[in-house]
Each structure stands twice: as structure tokens, then as C-alpha cells.
Amino acid sequence: MDWITSKKCDAATAAEMIQNGDVLGVSGFTLAGYPKAVPSAVAARAEKLHEAGTEFQITLFAGASTGDSCDGALARAKAMKLRMPYQSNPSLRKGINDGSIDYIDAHLGKMGYLVRTGAVAAPTVAIIEVSAILPDGRVCLSTSGGNSVCYLEMAPKIILELNTRLGDSCVGMHDNALPELPPHARPLAIYSAGDRVGEEFVRIDPNKVIAIVENDGFDEVTPFVEPDEISRNIGERILDFIRFEEKSGRLPKGMAYQSGVGKVANAVLCAMADDDRLGQIDLFTEVIQEAVLPLLKKGKLGVASGTALTLSESAQREFVQNAEQWKKHFVLRQQEVSNSPDLIRRVGVISMNTALEADIFGNVNSSLVCGSAMMNGIGGSADFARHCALGFFLTPSVAKGGAISSIVPYVSHVDHTEHDTQIFVTEQGLADLRGLPSEERARLIIKNCVHPDFREPLTDFLEFSLKHAKGVHMPVALSRAFEMHLKFLETGKML
């Protein structure tokens, strides 16, 4: 019997190998390529142990968010003590915000480094979804790179989930290099989106494998929704600005694009696909969303480099069917590489990320509602915002039917300071803040990006602050900085 056959078992048996206090390092990045069978079985085991009065909780490290069969199941079973570095699951979010689950919100490009250098605990068990296992100990990852190579290297025990649905569709897409650790680390020779420097497969020690579990599940990704009018408006404004910058000689042609998660970011890619004036483009991003497929089908996609291929179930089926022709356009990297500041600067990236809220001075909150309630996390937005060649933050000007302004006097939590932001876009307009001092930035954002209902109160705050703040370099009157947030908490409306 070969080693692969000897290690095969069902998910429940594999779950019995997980002990209270274990640190699980799982594959997966933004709902792509995460283990689906074993985490659900661990959750079921936890519920039985809790009913018997036995303590059982684990720490979960991933690449970013995972699907409900992983994050959600473990959270609802009260099996999760600590989660890091990013999540997007409603059940997990509830646990984080009621204090029953500890959460460390970390820059995605730094997570692997923290584990590899011992700054945070290494996983005791790696649970990694793969699409192929070879007799010589090499494995092919599935639809994400994430931190999988790091966890496979660092964990003394490995559980592999073999996704039988994928066949050989992922073989050839992965580039599994990791950056060298300092001091004197040599750079990775990546200069454009399609450059490869690593191996297609990951070599593991078969002696570390304690179980192999088969699954045939789909990544639990929300079906793709066509962009609404506001999202399309924002996408068109961005493309118009990029053309203007290219025509003015301030932006070289051939830059790669990074697009964050969500319908607004998706709308930009859809606008690119529909733009007959736009030639072939490359992506150097973290999440390759479904909106990239229209670009591919219309012959406008050169190479999409990222760490996750996040597709709805129908698109996953379509990709597997067309993988032989399509996968040459994709490179899936480890997130220490996809989100590397060095490579983002060197490749030259036009970055587009979504803001939860922004203030009139250019600070951005990506993670916390009213400064304390976690939404999802900072993700990889800062990796790109600080190091990109040209950076956009996107948001509709209002939310909750107009009750909330996405532009506020001062953000309730700062993820990206005004030092790292460049251009803001809402459906109202675009504000290029590069080279502008604080008061000019504020006036331009209010004029171009704020919804008409909120322009007067925001202008009033600015004028008040110019008279009453301690200094006018950054005119923030502390007595009124959060009055719109406080009004919302009291009445459900910011006005």
C-alpha cells in the first residue's frame, strides 16, 4: 500500500486528530481554496465535546477569509478561540463583536512573515486543500495560494483535503516561491505580472501527513451580480481619469491593476471589459474576482497574477471546463509575494480599494463600524495603497438609504492615513489629493465626492475647525469630530 492510500480517511476520523488548544493553519484566501470537510467535522466534534462538558477550542490561521463550512461552522460551534488575519463570515463577525472570539486583524502580506519568524505561534496542524497529490510528496494547491506553503513548512502535522472536483484544472497555475527572510534577503526576480520564480507544486514531507480526506465541494462564493448604476458610475470615472493621466504623460501605459473585493471594485473590471478603447491589461492583485472572466473572454486579459481565484459556483464549473485554454492567463502566488511591497512598487500597480468610510482629510477606515464593531478587517488594502504607483479609494457617497455619509468629518478608526491615500472616487465625482495641503484636500473632497445632503454640515465642520482647532495644519476640532457618528448611534441617521 502506498503512503497516499494508507493515509486516506473520512473527515470525522481526521477531526479526531485535532486536539483542544491546537493552532490550525488552513489554506484559503477570500473564500477560495479553503478546506471544507475537516473544519466542519471539527465543529461537529466540538459541539459533542461541549455537550459532554469537555473543553475544546482551537486557534485558526488562514490566508484571509474562508467559507461558511470553515469559519462559520467553527464559530457557531464555539470551537474557535482566536482568529487571524482576516474574515468575512457573519457568524464569526458576531463572535468577534460580542467578545467570545478573539481576533487579530493583520496586514495580509505580513502574516506569513510573522509565522515564519516566530512572532506568532506556528500552526500545530496544517489543513490544506489540494487538487493533486503525487507519490513523491509533491502537492498541487487548489484555487488559492494564501499562506499554504508557510503552514505546510511550519506545521509538524499535515491534513490534506483532496478536492476531486478540480481534476488538473489548477496544475500549472501556481508559482509557490516565498521571499527570503532578512537580513540580506535577495529579491525575487519578478518584474511583471506573468513572471514566475517558483515551483508549480509544493514539496512536503509525507511523514508529516496524518490524514488525507477527499472532498468535492465548491468554494462558497456569492453569485456574481452585475454592477449597479452607482458602481458603474465610479468605474467609468476611474477609467476616464486613467486615460487623462496617460494622455498628460504622468502615467505610463502598461501598468498592472489591482482590484479589491466587492461590487464597486468588480464594476471597474466590468467597465474595462466593455471599453473598446482599452487594450490588453495585466492584473497584479491579491483576489482575482469573477469580473476578470469577461476580460478574458473578450481577449483583453494578458495575465492575472494573484493569490486567489474567487469564482461563483457556476463560474467554477466553467473554469474547470475551460482550464486547459484559460489557465495560461493566471498565476497564483503565495500572499507574501502577491502582497509584497517590493513587488508592488517594482511592477507598477494601479490600485483600487473600497473604503468603509473616509474623512475630508483623506484618512480611510476599512474595518471598524463606528470605531469599534469589526466588519471584515484591513485585508491587503494597505499593502497596495502605500506602495502602488497610483491609488484609488472607492465608495458610494451614502449608505443605508442615505442615512449615512461615507465621507465624515474624521474617521472613527484609521486604517490608511492621509499620507498613504491619493485619489477618492464616489458616484458624485473624483478628488485627486496628490500634492495638496490639508485644507485644500478637505474642500476638494467635499466639493467633488460628498453627497449634496452632507456638503453643508461637512463644510460647517471645516470652517468651525479652522477657527477652533489647536492648529490649522490639520484643522480638526475635537469637540465636533465625531458628532455625525454619535448622531447615527442615537437616531440611526447622521443628520
Image: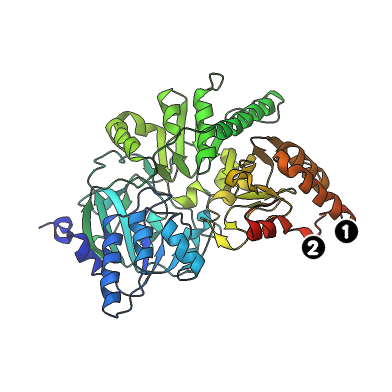
- Most extreme residue toward the front, as rendered? 491
The residue that mark 2 highlights is: 479
Determine if residue 116 is in view.
no
Left or right of 465? Residue 30 is left
The color scheme shown is rainbow
Asked if 303 appears above or below 127 in the picture, the reply is above
Q: Are marks 2 and 1 in contact (CB under 8 Å)?
A: yes
Q: Mark 1: which amino acid?
A: His
Percent of width and height locating residue 236 = 60, 28
Q: Residue 200's quadrant in the figure?
A: top left
Category of crowding for the residue at label 2, using alpha-carbon neighbours closer than 10 angstroms: few (below 14), some (14–19), many (at least 20) = few
What residue would you read off at disc 1? 468
Helix, strand, or loop for circle 1? Answer: helix
User: Measuring 29% from the left and 80% from the top, which residue is drawn there?
Assistant: 53
- x 66%, y 29%: residue: 241
Q: Residue furthest left?
A: 1
Label 2 SS? helix
Please, which residue is most extreme toward the right here? 467
Q: CA distance from mark 2 to mark 1?
A: 9 Å
- Mark 2 or mark 1, which has the lower sequence index? 1
Q: Residue at x 60, y 34 (%)?
A: 234
The type of residue carrying mark 2 is: Ser
Instruction: Say whether residue 459 is left or right of residue 192.
Output: right
